[in-house]
Image (cartoon, helix red, strand yellow):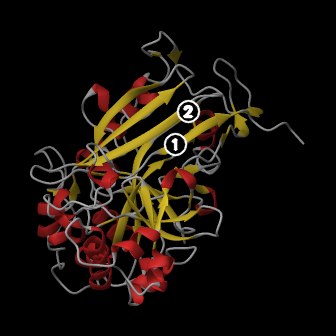
Amino acid sequence: MSGTGAPMPIELNATHDPARRSWVGSANASGTEFPIQNLPFGVFDEGKGARGGVALGDRIIDLSALLAAGLISGPAAEAACGATLLPLFAQPRRAMSELRAALSDLYRADGEGDRRAAETALVPMAEADLLMPAKPAAFTDFCTSADHILRMAANGGRAPQPAWATLPVAYNGRASSVAASGTPVIRPVGQFVPRGAERMVVGPEPMLDFELEFGAWLGGPVNHLGESVDMARADEMLFGCCLVNDWSARAIQFYEMLLGPHLGKSFLTTISPWVVTMEALAPFRVPGRGRTAEQPEVPAYLNDPFDRASGGLNVELTAEIDTGSGPATIVHTNVAELFWTLAQMVTHQASGGAPLETGDLIATGTVSGAADEARACLVEITKLGQEPLTLPDGTKRVILEDGDTLTLRGKATAEGYVPIGFGPCSGTVMPARAAS
């Protein structure tokens, strides 16, 4: 395995100070997802062209305006200004840290920068379209929740394949159908066998589902073909995180699963448009989930002391459904429940010599926990349709119906630190397109 030994952990610094406040009032509001301790990166367009920005309260910091005014400088600042964040993902952590520090100092309440020029660079978030931060170089969807795997196997009346306990299971997804929050969810058409029938038909998906997932964008230093990545280097390749909804056409998926998911997963994957950096998430790292005496030991190439101590993230996740009567929360779970860590996913992805690239997107798979409220998809919630979900207004759901809106939210929390969020990851189900 290639690498440089122990990872260089991200050190807490002044940008994490819970006492720090911004002169942008909305960044200090109770419950804001984007306090000055967060400063996530994204791409926006309010009618003047797509370009890089940073979320602060209910405003977007226009980085190109700051760069033109000389209020920020350096390679990372230049890389963050364009219509894609790919150049930013390639920046070293030190340069990223310096850029976050400069932005934090510029917008902190007691800062000494040019406040008038800095204020000119603020764009109301409500007036902007939030775009994809980058086109993923590749997309890999893992399946790293033990609770999800075991529950799905039990619901199907079978034993799970043993590999789930020794490696982070995954499939290579379709990067071209990853889209930003708000993209319509067009019900796919495909092959499936209707319930109670014996023959395949072609038609609109009858069992549309969501999957509440967590994602990470990768940056440098990347590996080359035939080169593996050790756990230390894998951690350094994690640039930042987002929320992921891996929409699932269950009937199509179940019918095609001779080799793995294909069209049942490739029609759309929705992500939250803001990328929360690993530096911003540093206070919220927690130990990776341990193993019971009955479970296999972690293979050596995935076993790392730093990862065991700090590989997890304390990020509370929720899913809301709105069938027309207002949103109702139907899932409460946490990234810390996962059986495998983000770094383990990266290391395993490259363990056979597959080259990873700047801008690769990985997702954790369904983030289900042990509690009933932590069942993070409808097939788990309803036990494959045997127990319909009843919403507060009496509406029942076994599958997602046309017109339903599903929204994911996330909040990183730790005692003594200001919580930070990711912004919504949302989509509304639309009818299948008519046959051409």
Label 2 sits on a secondary structure element that is strand
Q: Residue at x 57, y 35 (%)?
A: 250
Q: Give the x, y percent position of residue 296.
A: 19, 52
* Mark 1 element type: strand
Amino acid type, residue under disc 2 in the picture: Thr
User: Where the C terminus falls, by quadrant?
Assistant: top right
Residue 220 at what x, y percent from top left? 38, 82
Residue underneath mark 2:
405
**Can residue 142 be seen at all in this image of the molecule?**
yes
Residue 107: x %, y % from top left: 30, 68
**For the view shown, which residue lies furthest in the right direction?**
436
Picture disc at residue 426: 1
Tell me the amino acid under the disc marked 1: Ser
Q: Do the numbered discs 1 and 2 sit on residues whose CB atoms are within 8 Å?
A: yes
Q: CA distance from mark 1 to mark 2?
A: 7 Å
| Residue at 33% over, 38% down | 368
Specify whether 91 is left or right of 21.
right
